[in-house]
Amino acid sequence: MIKKYNYNPLLFNKIDFQLPGISKNEMQLMWLCSYHSLKNKKVNCENTLFTTGIGLSGVPHMGTISQIIRAIKLQRGGNKVQIVLGDIDAYTGRHISWTQTQYLKEKYRNFILKLGFNS
């Protein structure tokens, strides 16, 4: 990916595109950078799936809530969006019991749906 798109992790590009249902100005407020410029390229959202992931570490904090709200905004704009809940990471990386991990996963899922995400 780095080679294909000439991505330099030290240099961030200004967002120079918009997505269905989200203006360019909103895009620039919601995200700080893009990994590669989509300028002069037509974004085919019909064939694009936006994915974000959330670690299950406990109670969702403001960063997590902001991430969920952005996913909902993309979805409401007519874009395909999925949120991946990091249950394996919680279990193996954070050493949370499998029972507790499943409990957290269900709590996060319900929380995300109550915020307005359409599964």
Image: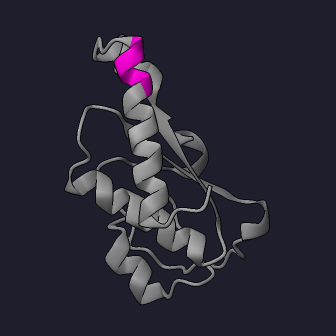
Task: Provide residue 32's location: percent of width, then percent of height.
Answer: 32, 67
Seen from the viewer's position, the closer of residues 89 and 47 is: 89
Query: Who's the residue at 36% across and 68% down the image?
Result: 31
Instruction: Give above or below for 117 relative to 4.
Output: below
The magenta stretch spans residue 40: no
Instruction: Give above or below for 1 relative to 113.
Output: above
Query: Who's the residue at 49% across and 67% down the image?
Result: 116
Q: Quadrant of the C terminus?
A: bottom right
Query: Who's the residue at 78% across and 67% down the image?
Result: 46
Which portion, as a residue range, is magenta? Answer: 98-102
Task: Provide residue 78's location: percent of width, then percent of height.
Answer: 66, 75
Seen from the viewer's position, the closer of residues 19 and 70 is: 70
Q: Is residue 97 left or right of residue 27?
A: left
Q: What is the quadrant of residue 12 in the picture?
A: bottom left
Seen from the viewer's position, the closer of residues 102 and 66 is: 102
Main secondary structure found in the magenta portion? helix
Residue 107 in view = yes
